[in-house]
Image (spheres, rainbow, N blue to C red):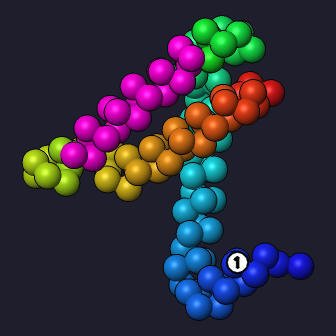
Amino acid sequence: MKNKSIEFCENKYPVMTAAFKEILNQMYTTFCEKQHDYGPTNISLGRDLSKKENKTKSLTGVWFRSNDKLCRVDNLLNNGFKAKNESLEDSFLDLANYSVISLLVCKDKWEK
């Protein structure tokens, strides 16, 4: 049985909700591709995340990466910067994935 809020949104906004699901799939694909290329240690810093201080360092690293993406978005939107290698959409996908990665770290699911 579908959640009533989901049913409402999908009926009232079918194009938007279908596009949202497509973006979520694109996020997941991007996440898996980056995990394949880089592995999880770039987030865990090669440390045991069951220790609070290591988890804090990991989340701080994700925050720095997110800040880099936000600065890139600012350049693309407000300074007329033309990126050669990463589009505005790519930056938004990375930001969304960093948010999910942060939740995975917080919930002790990273690297498991």
Q: Hey, which quadrant is residue 3 in on the image?
A: bottom right
Horizontal side, residue 92 vs residue 31: left or right: left
Q: Is residue 52 magenta?
A: no
Stretch of the chain drawn in magenta: 56-74
Q: Residues within 10 Å of mark 1 (few under 14, many from 20)?
A: few
Q: Position of residue 76 (x, y in %)?
A: 20, 50
Q: Give the residue displayed 68% in from the left and 35% down from the top.
A: 104
Q: Residue furthest left?
A: 79
What residue is pinned by disc 1? 6
Magenta span dominant secondary structure: helix
Horizontal side, residue 54 vs residue 86: left or right: right
Q: Nearer the viewer, residue 60 or 21?
A: 60
Q: Nearer the viewer, residue 32 or 57?
A: 57
Q: Is residue 64 magenta?
A: yes
Q: Position of residue 87 (x, y in %)?
A: 32, 51
Residue 10 in sight in this render = yes
Q: Position of residue 29 (x, y in %)?
A: 62, 50
Q: Give the residue displayed 62% in from the left and 82% down from the top.
A: 9
Q: Position of residue 92 (x, y in %)?
A: 41, 51
Task: Kindly identify the amino acid type of the residue bearing the numbered disc 1.
Answer: Ile
Q: Residue furthest bottom?
A: 12
Helix, strand, or loop for circle 1?
A: helix
With respect to residue 55, does 86 lie above or below?
below
Q: Give the residue displayed 52% in from the left and 38% down from the top.
A: 98
With respect to residue 109, does 8 lie above or below?
below
The count of marks equals 1
